[in-house]
Image: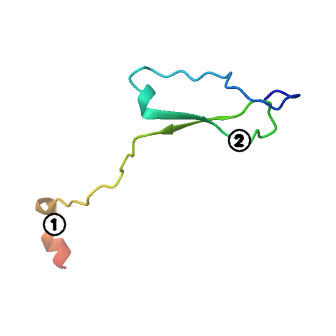
């Protein structure tokens, strides 16, 4: 952020392998947080689902103990 003109530029670098470069979006954050550099936000373009379907090992259950 230039102190006189208020113009900004992306002088900071972010390194990533070519195979991952299209999987992320690079964006400077507007809030300076007291710095003269804009923080950089890297966001994944891929949605990752962590939802797992429940499953049970019915054959390993102790059914006698369960019934009591």
3 shown above or below 33: above
Badge 2 or badge 1: first in the primary sequence: 2
Name of the residue lying farthest toward the bottom: 68
Point out residue 2 in the picture as x, y percentages from the top left corner.
Answer: 82, 27
Q: Secondary structure at mark 1?
A: loop
Is 61 or 4 nearer to us in this picture? 4
Image side of residue 60 versus residue 44, left or right: left
Image side of residue 52 versus residue 32, left or right: left
Q: Residue at x 68, y 21 (%)?
A: 11
Q: Where the C terminus falls, by quadrant?
A: bottom left
C-alpha gap between disc 2 and disc 1: 59 Å
Which residue position holds label 1?
62
Point out residue 17 in the picture as x, y percentages from the top left corner.
Answer: 44, 20
Q: How many marks?
A: 2
Q: Secondary structure at mark 2?
A: loop
Q: Residue at x 47, y 34 (%)?
A: 24
Q: Are marks 2 and 1 in contact (CB under 8 Å)?
A: no
Mark number, residue 48: none
Name of the residue lying farthest toward the left: 59
Which residue position holds label 2?
30
Is 28 or 53 nearer to us in this picture? 28
Point out residue 59 in the picture as x, y percentages from the top left corner.
Answer: 10, 60
For residue 39, which quarter of the picture?
top right
Q: Foreground mark, 2 or 1?
A: 2
Q: Where the N terminus falls, by quadrant?
A: top right
For residue 15, which quarter of the picture?
top right
Q: How is the image coloured?
A: rainbow
Q: Residue at x 13, y 73 (%)?
A: 64
Q: Within 10 Å of the Cα at label 1, are there few (<14), some (14-19), or many (20+) other Cα atoms? A: few
Q: Within 10 Å of the Cα at label 2, are there few (<14), some (14-19), or many (20+) other Cα atoms? A: few
Q: Residue at x 82, y 32 (%)?
A: 6
């Amino acid at each position: 952020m230039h102190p006189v003109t208020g113009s900004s530029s992306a002088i900071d670098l972010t390194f990533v392998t070519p195979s991952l470069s299209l999987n992320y979006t690079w964006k400077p954050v507007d809030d300076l947080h007291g710095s003269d550099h804009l923080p950089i936000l890297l966001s994944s373009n891929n949605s990752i689902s962590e939802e797992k379907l429940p499953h049970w090992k019915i054959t390993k259950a102790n059914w006698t103990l369960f019934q009591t």
